[in-house]
Amino acid sequence: MSKSKILKAMHSSAKGLYDAGVMDAVTMREMDELCLPVIEKMTAKQIKQLRLGNHISQPVFAKYLNVKPITVKKWEQGEKHPSGAALMLLQVVSHNGLSALQF
């Protein structure tokens, strides 16, 4: 069983205990935090491959991620590294495709 499946099962059990009034809110919040997915860093090559795999230009990719085109260029050249919300969006695109960012 993978780590993510184990964490999902643990979280589901904890939610049941919380709903039944056996687990307090503080413990449930700690469980929620523990079960958040780990956001892995991406290399310049991975970012470029992700963009090219979606057949879009740097300016278009930047619009999807709500960053400036120069930022995408610097990521792909290894001059800067995405973090925070931008890194999360890159992970979403990597796992679910660009359509996950479309309304």
Image (spheres, helix red, strand yellow):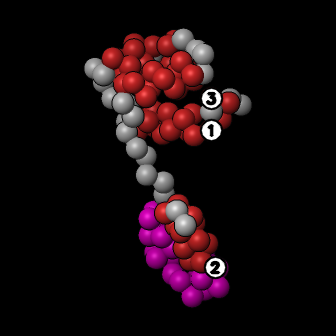
Residue 26 location (% of width, % of height): 46, 75
Q: Quadrant of residue 43?
A: top left
- Of the residues shown, which amino acid type is indicated by label 1? Asn
Q: Which residue is mark 2?
A: 16
Tell me the residue at 51%/26% (across/down): 50
Q: Is residue 80 left or right of residue 48?
A: left
Q: Residue furthest bottom?
A: 22
Which residues lie in the magenta part? Answer: 15-35
Q: Is residue 19 magenta?
A: yes
Badge 2 amino acid? Gly
What residue does disc 3 label? 98
Mark 3 residue element = helix
Residue at x-position 54% and y-position 11%: 57
Q: Which residue is mark 1?
A: 96
Q: Is residue 101 visible?
A: no
Q: Is residue 50 above or below residue 28?
A: above
Residue 5 visible in this rendered orientation of the protein: yes
Magenta segment's dominant SS is helix
